[in-house]
Image (tube, rainbow, N blue to C red):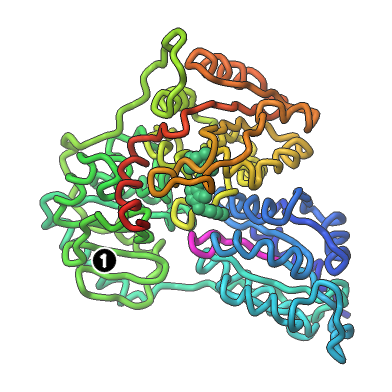
Amino acid sequence: METSQSIGTYLIQRLHAYGVRHVFGVPGDYVLGFFQQLVESPLQVVNTCDEQGAGFAADAYARVRGLGAVCVTYCVGGLKVANTTAQAFAEKSPVVVISGAPGTKERVKNPLLHHKVRHFDTQHKVFEQLTVASTVLSDPETALREIDRVLAAAMRYRRPVYIELPRDMISAPGLASHRPQEAQDVSDPESLGEAIREATGMINQARQPVIIAGIELHRFGLQDALLQLIEKTNIPVAAMLLSKSVIGERHPRYLGVYEGAFGYEEVRAYVESSDCLILLGAIMSDMDLGMYTANIDQGRSISVTSEKTSIRHHVYEGILLEDFLQGLIAADIKPREPGAIPHPEPPVAFSPVPGAKITVRRMFQRLNAFLDDDTVVIAEPGDALFGSADLFIHGHTEFLSPAYYTSMGFAVPACIGAQLGNPQRRPLVIVGDGAFQMTGMELSTAVRFSLNPIVVVLNNSGYGTERPMLDGPFNDILPWRFSRLPEILGSGKGFNIETEEQLDAALQAARAYTEGFCILDVHLDSYDISPALQRMTNMLGKRVK
Ligand SMILES: Cc1ncc(C[n+]2csc(CCOP(=O)(O)OP(=O)(O)O)c2C)c(N)n1
Ligand SMILES: [Mg+2]
């Protein structure tokens, strides 16, 4: 006779099969049974200070590892990860949201059970809007199949999914005869063949083809395939802000970050003078396209994402991004002469000017010289992100930032997910003082789990990004003594930084100290912003007034 597995343990087994080793979350009575199952499983529970921290950590984990999971209790926890799940949806990061819920038997007669908002399905309805697939596991007959369906959707679309576990279902046996199903999508061979032929012809006839490598290449693990295509054809490649580090930035065919009028003029001019743009997995957001100052003509473009393939104005159905990329690698594309192209300036050795007060520009120069092969940079929205666009990232997927959805509060919790997801990389977190005040106390979780991020706080006394658009007391915040957090957390090293020399010394000390986190409180003038942010706020300011 076949033995049946419980619904909860089956979910754990499937997450494990997809490479998940850590689950981030905060328990509550509706989900405690599942936490117990997790503790007894090969997955490690990483309980954070707050659910939002867990949600961002799971998102970062998914970005570096391919799939992440967050586990919370009903509504009070679940609704706190609505924002982080929205970000994962918008930026195509596959996070499995697992929420406990009142048991199916507790729901009869519609009692007012604690944490209920309006109806028992209110939370599920919210998450239907924020995920690519969702399910409430209320029927043991279908529960295991539902788990397979929802996880397959997360992998197919690289977007979040929602699984609600009524508490009386956690240990309930699923169907004994069930076998795991992993839906394997395939491209339509004729459609793919025709698209590759049209693309090959267009590329071969082009004077100056350029690849724009988008975020989906990270999400589908296609960074090496991209490299193969570039090395075979010598076609130059630009990244976007969201996809930055899709290719190691020292590669000789790398142009830099293309972001319309916000980026470097040479990159913009080179990309926009191309007669054949090959957009691979790109999200065309205002942030990535310099508030739509970018000039991309569909009539000169080949554009392929997990959702749509178009070549000039022809649309092809049924093509997977990975198959298209492999098709291009195999196609008869004639290699180009590797002529001169724009290329980002490599960092120069930094010599601190004695006594000089630190500025945003000099801080980023110093950070640039600090990066090495083992660093993953996590940049928070704000000037941390805009200034980081110029950092020279060594390896692929060593730069993480929510550059499209731009929710503050991502970077510190993200370093927990990023370092647990890939322990070979030490996180360098670049975060504004305002954003740090939202989720920075998750450093507590980093300490508990023996992580050692280096956190650089851009302390400009408030919401610097907003000041040039419209200033007022709403952009001011209470000054915190960030460098004294090690006293509160009982671990780590803090540095108070006013000058170039102090920054230099602190970074050297941080490199040498690997036993715990380091926090660098970098005091900047309230109105000192990076040149990239200056260009952007000039444009945005015109819209809010
Ligand atoms: C969750 C969230 N709330 C509000 C905003 C709007 N917002 C964008 S930038 C910014 C200020 C960020 O301040 P800080 O983190 O100190 O970085 P700085 O702008 O000073 O570099 C705000 C409030 C946002 N992006 N995300
Ligand atoms: Mg600030």
Picture layout, residue 436 above or below residue 77: above
Image-quadrant location for residue 227: top left
Answer yes or no: disc 1 within 8 Å of ligand 1.
Answer: no
Q: Nearer the viewer, residue 357 or 128?
A: 357
Q: Nearer the viewer, residue 20 or 4?
A: 20
Within-10-Å neighbours for mark 1: few <14, some 14–19, many 20+: many
In-image side of 381 versus 75 (left or right): left
Report the residue that reaches farthest toward the bottom. 109
Q: Magenta residues?
A: 88-97
Residue in the image at 84% along x and 88% along y: 110
In-image side of 109 versus 425 (left or right): right
Type of residue at label 1?
Ile
Image-quadrant location for residue 422: top right
Local SS, label 1: helix
Where residue 470 appears, x then y in whole percent? Answer: 41, 49
Image quadrant in which the N terminus is located: bottom right
Residue in the image at 41% along x and 32% along y: 528
State the residue position of label 1.
196
Residue in the image at 61% along x and 21% along y: 496
Q: Is residue 422 visible?
A: no
Q: Is residue 315 visible?
A: yes
Picture layout, residue 101 above or below residue 200: below
Where residue 359 appears, x then y in whole percent? Answer: 43, 25
Picture layout, residue 215 above or below residue 337: below
